[in-house]
Amino acid sequence: MISMTSRKAGLLILVLACLAAVAACGSSNNTSSGAGSNPTGPVTVATRSGPMGTYLTDGQGRSLYLFVADTSGTSTCTGACAAQWPPLITSGTPQAGSGVTASMLSTVARADGTKQVTYGNHPLYLFTGDNAAGDTNGQGVNAFGALWWLVSPAGSAITTAATPTGGY
């Protein structure tokens, strides 16, 4: 016969397992920020001004970068590279925020079938080392075979080497 204490412990374990499963489902990145694999709509590209001038951001103010190794509007950042430098993904037509030229926004198909946002023919990326809106810890980083730069509203690389923000 099972004791009442064993039944309560078993029930507690079952409840905790269910809560863990619900929490895991609730933590998926299913937002329109573009950082996840399942964006729910078009992303917005905007601008922000800082020590390196005015640069592109996503709709949440996170810095956007270009990868010098990308050519002809095609992304070469996959696997471990894309894990550290997530591509800005959209499920719709990217939207131009303040300071952004809408005609310079487009998308390019990635190998996994997702649509990566481009600006001035440069695929756009976030950086996992940026912890908050306005952080620019990826500026001038040499990783995965080439340099990473913030993108100006004119569509060019901002090659100013400045002290990164955010304490990375």
Image: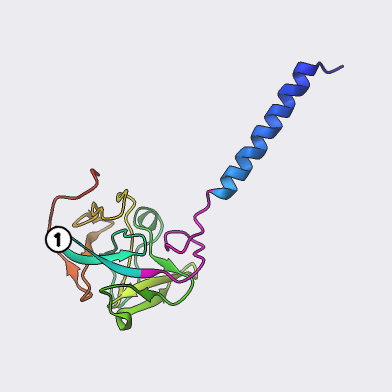
Residue at the spot 69% in from the left edge and 33% down from the top edge:
15
Task: Provide the residue designation for mark 1.
Answer: 52
- Work out whether residue 28 or residue 37 is closer to the camera in this orientation and state it: 28
- Residue 64 higher or lower than 119, as above or below: above
Asked if the magenta segment contains residue 45, the reply would be no
Residue 149 percent coordinates (x, y): 21, 62
- Residue 140 higher or lower than 46, as above or below: above
Which residue is situated farthest in the right direction here? Answer: 1
Asked if the magenta segment contains residue 36, the reply would be yes
Residue 143 percent coordinates (x, y): 25, 55
Q: Secondary structure at mark 1?
A: loop
| Quarter the C terminus occupies | top left
Q: Note whether residue 68 is visible.
A: no
Residue at the spot 22% in from the left edge and 63% down from the top edge:
150
Q: In screen coordinates, is 49 left or right of 133?
A: left
- Work out whether residue 144 or residue 89 is closer to the camera in this orientation and state it: 89
Q: In screen coordinates, is 94 left or right of 31?
A: left
Q: Amino acid at mark 1?
A: Met
- Residue 47 higher or lower than 17, as above or below: below
Segment tinted magenta in the rendering: 27-44
In which quadrant of the rendered view does residue 89 lie?
bottom left
| Quarter the N terminus occupies | top right
Q: Note whether residue 162 is visible.
A: yes
In which quadrant of the rendered view does residue 18 lie?
top right
Q: In screen coordinates, is 24 left or right of 120?
A: right
Q: In screen coordinates, is 142 left or right of 76?
A: left
- Dot 1, how many residues are within 10 Å of its Cα: few (below 14), some (14-19), or many (20+)? some
Residue 90 percent coordinates (x, y): 45, 69
